[in-house]
Image (tube, helix red, strand yellow):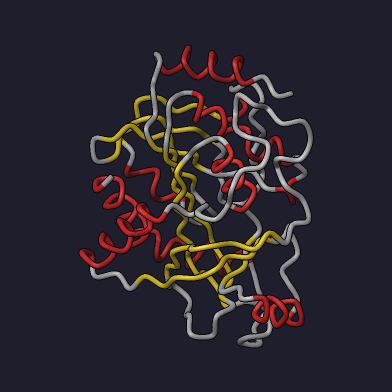
Amino acid sequence: MMDYKAACDRINELSGGFKPEIIVVLGSGLAGFADRVKAETVIPYGDIPGFGISTAPYHNGRLILGTVEDKRVACMDGRLHLYEGHGLEGVVFPLRVLRKLGADKIFLTNATGGINTSFKVGDIMLVEDHINFQGRNPLMGPNDEELGVRFPDMTYAYNPELRRIAEECADRLGIELKKGVYIACTGPSYETPAEIRAFRLLGADAVGMSTVPEVIAAVHCGLKVLTLSLITNMAAGITGNKLTMEEVAETGRQRSLVLGGLVSEIIKAC
């Protein structure tokens, strides 16, 4: 079992007892949002017991504690992925720790490949549901009753009220918000064109290598979940172009201001 108390104690020691309301997780190329946080404490993941070291490109691997729109925010500037070699328990450990510190909402962002052919690069998709194609679940093994029930319901994993707020905020900002289903693979290889055709038949609108384990663990421990996906490229076989991490990061940089503004507006409205 992971030592949640040691992690909580260390964060409390370094932050003076900061109590977050909202967790914000930043995906690939979206680290620009961190500049919106009025930081009170910045802690490298390596300084917190149990937190894995983020090795993915453009993930800074630090916990930023501060305020956005006068709300207390714990910003994960970079997440952990299965493809880095982290176990599922390690991937979701940080959000469980932040839940124990007081957070009751989690806003997840990610960079995704567009499967829905009506999407275009730069679109923002409000995730309504997901398909777990990673072949594993972070709740496998003995259940920790202090975190949540053995069999959590996933019918409303993506909180309807937070989705409504997100749509209203997007309207106010003049942002066209797509809606759809996110499918998660393990990576790190990008998907094949045949896999993308199969995922489209399954009802997926966008594909990525993260987020779903975090959503499952968040629902299990009582966090309200909102997820926004930035379409950083069209998935394999749609345009005929090769897929590169540089393309993902560049789109993230170009659109991070818009996505960051939307997340800030949602935080303000909550």
Image coordinates for residue 29, horizontal then vertical, percent: 50, 56
Name, please, the residue furthest toward the left. 172
- Identify whether 209 is placed above or below 107: below
- Identify whether 118 is placed above or below 233: below
Nearer to me, 206 or 152: 152
Left/right placement of residue 7 relative to residue 106 reads right
Image coordinates for residue 18, horizontal then vertical, percent: 39, 21
Q: In percent of the image, x 57 and y 31: which residue is there?
A: 96
Left/right placement of residue 20 relative to residue 248 reads left
Image coordinates for residue 110, horizontal then vertical, percent: 52, 57
Q: Quadrant of residue 248?
A: bottom right
Image coordinates for residue 3, horizontal then vertical, percent: 67, 19
Q: In percent of the image, x 66 and y 40: which residue is there?
A: 91
Left/right placement of residue 242 relative to residue 98 reads right
Q: In percent of the image, x 35 and y 25: which residue is there?
A: 40
Q: Quadrant of the N terminus?
A: top right
